[in-house]
Amino acid sequence: MNQFVTPSPLLPDAQGLFGSFGGRFVAETLMPLILSLQEEYDSAKQDPDFQRELAYFQSDYVGRPSPLYFAERLTEHFGGAKIYLKREELNHTGAHKINNCIGQVLLAKRMGKKRIIAETGAGMHGVATATVAARFGLDCVVYMGSTDIERQQPNVFRMKLLGAEVIPVTSGTGTLKDAMNEALRDWVTNIDDTFYIIGTVAGPHPYPAMVRDFQAVIGHETRRQMQEKEGRLPGSLIACIGGGSNAMGLFHPFLSDESVQMIGVEAGGKGVATGQHAASLNGGTPGVLHGNRTYLLQDEDGQIIDAHSISAGLDYPGIGPEHAWLHEQGRVEYVSATDDEALEAFQICCREEGIIPALETAHALAEVAKRAPTLPRDHLMVVNLSGRGDKDMMSVAHYLGDKFQ
Amino acid sequence: MSQTNSTVGIPRIERCFAALKAQNRPALVSYLTAGDPNPEASQRLLDGLPDTGVDIIELGMPFSDPMADGPAIQKAALRALEAGQTQVKTLSMVKRFREKNRDTPIVLMGYYNPIYRYGVERFLADAAEAGVDGLIVVDIPPEHDDELCTPAARHGIDFIRLATPTTDAKRLPRVLESASGFIYYVSVAGVTGVGAATPETIKRAVDTLKRHTTLPVAVGFGIRTPEQAATIGRFSDAVVVGSALVDCIERARTADEAVESVHGLARELAQSVRRCREEQAVS
Ligand SMILES: Cc1ncc(COP(=O)(O)O)c(C=O)c1O
């Protein structure tokens, strides 16, 4: 990193831009809605009642704060950096996704909306959305790619139990990007009564900033907890990246702390060189999709290329615009982990810590496996344990089945 | 509409609407996706449209992720991409069309990413040279005028704005500010090819738009039949038919049948639109 950059608390600008990334690239039909959402969000942020309500649901419903846990056995296993896990998998519904859903559903209620829609990949965001919709008595429709429905069956069932309608999306490869297209089509058709809860730091402004703000509770808690436990700042933060919400939530409160290194881990699939991956920053180029300018997997003609990852939650050909900006600024380092590396790290975490992580999260752990052994014992490393792996049992059984015969 | 000295330099879209105003009839605007069902048939479809009576041609630039389109146009984009359509091929289709036709305006319609990837300046220069008259880019609102709308004006290409049922009094001035060519009123809040508003609702919206702009107002989304086209054409300056034409391609068993069927429907629509205000005067 050449020069320390001003972090993004002041970004995005009035157009929703982080440098040249972000923006509001949506159909005119949606513009008035997006502008009023922004107004509502700006006023909610200033409203002590809204903040109080949010804090209440975060603690009593979600179960926050989540522990910052010293992973003693993982630390011994890798024999280097002192590893802490930020236990987002202990939240209600088993991932960080609900931090954002609680915030957005309170906004939806404030705006008098009666119907919630969402896209989902791994199904964790879908489950979190179905959960808050049930809690607030709102109708809920979740769009999910048909490929993902197959590989995340338990979550499909959970959503249905919670009263949501799950609509299979067969266009494209039937994964997250196609689900997002379909959710946008629903939204533009049902503008009056519907609130779209986007599940990551992507989409048109104000979503990237709003989702970031709701997820930033992860980083704020980590800062306080690390201060209590170690009396100093962490040396590095590591998180996996699908659209980038769990990573942004952990990173954002530390952007001004020059000494804190940050590493985002993209899904390398079968290897970035094979073309079968979901690493938009490491293997993509700038473009415009789903309401924002960011790095995308695309061909020469600007057609979007399907992503590949063992993990449904990372299987997306784009990334949140603020990450694209932080990448170009050099503030955050973006690396990738392959399917195989993630599976290996997944098993180490199960065996050493008795924690079954989500396959998404396993990508972050794969980077820990590479990096921790090279670091001194007084280096404090925080890994965002973004979700638990119950939903992945079928997929993992498919990949590792033979081993456990 | 032959080109005379006095009209040289006047943009084709403006010239077209002026001529139709003199005839007291609305324009028929057709939409097809470039490269659908394949490049060769698509060229024949395009080249034959003026003879059917189509006044303005919208040509879709296929995109892998058409968020604002319903199933019909989504499938058209997929057919075109599978048959190897690219931005370069779409522009050369227009160029070939222009070798034989100097008068019928062509508006390219699509999403920003393929243009952005091509390079905005390079795209505009190539489009102007090919004979493109206007652009409709669904995912660039006025807030992002500096991306494409302002540069397009420098190349003499109109940037056609969409107004929608959600465009209220507060929003309208913003939409009209940088609009040129004509205003495209999207008559339903939704995707292409699904649902339709009542003529009364549409008329109210068109009247409102006309109070705020001198640009012609075209109405699209949900217009499928010659009868609907005539009803809307009585009070709007143009009617746009897209999904119904695209459906003809999907239903056809061969490329020849697709060409025949699209041109057949276009001809019926054109006749209906030509007569729509006469009937009104009589009844
Ligand atoms: C457990 C878990 N981690 C991470 C992700 C990736 O999303 P993001 O990058 O927005 O955190 C998902 C998405 O489904 C997830 O379920």
Image (cartoon, grey):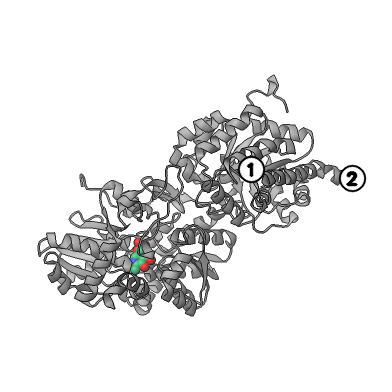
Q: Which residue is mark 1?
A: B183
Q: Are marks 2 and 1 on the same chain?
A: yes
Depicted A49 relative to depicted B200: above or below: below
Quarter of the image with the N terminus of chain B is top right
Question: Quadrant holding ligand 1?
Answer: bottom left
Mark 1 surroundings: few (<14), some (14-19) or many (≥20) residues within 10 A: many
Can residue B214 be seen?
A: no
Q: Residue at x 45, y 58 (%)?
A: A177
Q: Residue at x 20, y 53 (%)?
A: A258
Q: Position of residue A349 (x, y in %)?
A: 23, 72
Q: Nearer the viewer, residue B234 or A401?
A: A401
Chain holding disc 1: B
What is the CA distance from the residue labelled 2 to the residue labelled 1? 29 Å
Mark 1 C-beta closer than 8 Å to ligand 1? no
Q: Secondary structure at mark 2?
A: helix
Q: Position of residue A401 (x, y in %)?
A: 31, 74
**Left or right for A165, reference A82:** right
Chain holding disc 2: B
Q: Residue at x 42, y 42 (%)?
A: A300
Q: Nearer the viewer, residue A375 or A138?
A: A375
Q: Position of residue A336 (x, y in %)?
A: 28, 56
Q: Position of residue B155 (x, y in %)?
A: 53, 30
Q: Secondary structure at mark 1?
A: strand
Q: Which residue is mark 2?
A: B282
**Left or right for B241, reference A163:** right
Amino acid tagged 1 = Ile
Amino acid tagged 2 = Val
Mark 2 surroundings: few (<14), some (14-19) or many (≥20) residues within 10 A: few
From this viewpoint, which residue is outermost toward the right? Answer: B282
Sequence-first disc among 2 and 1: 1
